[in-house]
Structures are given as C-alpha cells and as structure tokens.
Amino acid sequence: MKRLCLVCQNVDCKSRGSEQLMKELAKLVAERALTDVEVRPYICFGACQDGPNIVLYPEKSWYAGVKTEDLKDIADRLAGGPDVKRLDKIDSSLKELIYQLLDTGVF
Ligand code: FES
C-alpha cells in the first residue's frame, strides 16, 4: 500500500486554502519522485477550526493550520526528514480517534 498524505477538503479547511495546498503538495511530492506517496483528499478530520489539516499515514503525523510555506517541510518529512513538530497542535485524544479509524482502512 502507498503511504498517504491526506489533505482535508471539507468546508472549513477548504475556506482556508486546502485545495491549493493539496495541489502544491502533490507537485512537491512529484518533484521529489516520491512514488510510494499518494496525496489524497480526505472528507474531514473533525478538527475543522484548526485547519487546514493534513495527516500522514501510516506515519501518523498530523499537521494543523498548514500554510503554503510549511509544505516544503512536510514534503521533506515524506522524504524521510524530521517531523514538523511546530504543526503538531491537535489534542492527542482526537488524534488517536482518527488514527484508529485510519487503521481500520477507512479513507
Ligand atoms: S473541515 Fe477540515 S478537519 Fe473538518
């Protein structure tokens, strides 16, 4: 299975630019030839006020309030670089809930 970079595309995240973020991230992933990574839309992570939200799976890294200038660091992370800890802002109980859902194979 490919590694996933899930970009929320529901109303709140979209109103903060997540559609453009997803496009730019897909471009960075392609530029780095990360063929095992798929950038994919996600319906909603339930942290709408903290968006745009991006979750890497199976890494289980959750990045909130992502801005265009953060995308390079996220792409570096996908290429094996360090976690982008400054964007790790979500409550751990919500993170666990979503990670459990992803573990069941629901995308
Ligand atoms: S709208 Fe993106 S987390 Fe809900």
Image (cartoon, rainbow, N blue to C red):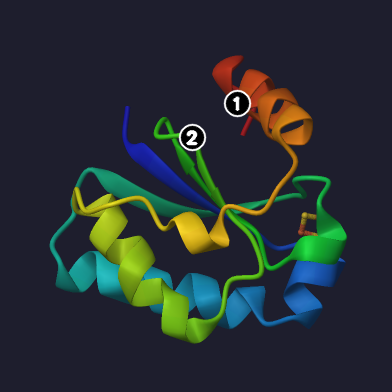
Mark 1 surroundings: few (<14), some (14-19) or many (≥20) residues within 10 A: some
Question: Please, what secondary structure does the residue beneath circle 1 have?
Answer: helix
* Residue 60 marker: 2
- In the displayed image of the protein, which residue is found farthest to the front? 86
Q: Residue at x 67, y 82 (%)?
A: 17
Left or right of 20? Residue 49 is right
Location of residue 14 in the rendering, given as x and y in whole percent from the top left corner: 75, 74
Q: Are marks 1 and 2 in contact (CB under 8 Å)?
A: yes
Pick the front one: 101 or 30: 101
Asked which quadrant contains residue 65, the reply is: bottom right
Between residue 85 and residue 33, name the one nearer to us: 85
Kindly give the residue lying farthest to the top in the view shown.
104
For this rendering, which residue is in front, 55 or 3? Answer: 55
- What number is the disc on residue 45? none
In this view of the protein, which residue sits in the foreground, 73 or 11?
A: 73
Residue extending furthest left? 33
The quarter of the rendered structure image containing the N terminus is: top left
**Amino acid type, label 1:** Leu
Q: Is residue 25 left or right of residue 75?
A: right
Position of residue 41 measured from the top left corner of the image (x, y, whole percent): 59, 56
Residue at screen point 68% across, 25% down: 96
Residue matched to label 1:
102
Q: From the viewer's perspective, is 48 left or right of 52?
A: right
Between tags 1 and 2, which lies in front?
2
Q: Amino acid at mark 2?
A: Lys
> SS for tag 2?
loop
Question: What x and y, as percent, mark residue 31?
Answer: 17, 73
